[in-house]
Amino acid sequence: MRKVVLTSSVMTLPLTAPGGPPSDERQGTTDLRVPYIRAKTEGERVAWRLAGELGLGRAPLRRAVPA
């Protein structure tokens, strides 16, 4: 295995204030009350941890608009 690839969701990103800096994969939402958001956020954290532990590259795929 050379890379961990996952399909992420914009729901894993925290909301930012208008005019504020954009969010990226280093920041995760802290609002985990909604099961979908919690599942996507926790899954993303596990994937990144696994990639780090195995010394693999990361390739996040994040859709801007859900289909």
Image (cartoon, rainbow, N blue to C red):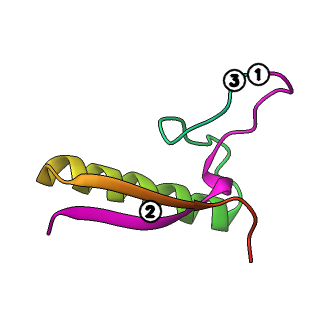
Q: Amino acid at mark 3?
A: Pro
Dot 3 corresponds to which residue? 21
Q: Residue at x 34, y 59 (%)?
A: 47
Q: Residue at x 76, y 64 (%)?
A: 65
Dot 2: what SS? helix
Q: Nearer the viewer, mark 2 or mark 1?
A: 1
Q: Residue at x 33, y 51 (%)?
A: 48
Q: Residue at x 47, y 36 (%)?
A: 26
Label 1 Cα neighbours within 10 Å, binned few <14 / some 14-19 / many ≥20 = few
Q: Nearer the viewer, residue 7 or 49?
A: 7
Q: Are marks 1 and 3 in contact (CB under 8 Å)?
A: yes
In the visual, does 11 lie left or right of 8? Answer: right
Q: Amino acid at mark 1?
A: Gly
Residue 43's mark? Answer: 2
Q: Nearer the viewer, residue 11 or 56?
A: 56
Label 3 Cα neighbours within 10 Å, binned few <14 / some 14-19 / many ≥20 = few
Q: Amino acid at mark 2?
A: Gly
Picture quadrant of residue 67: bottom right
Picture quadrant of residue 1: bottom left
Instruction: Tell me the magenta residue range.
Output: 1-19
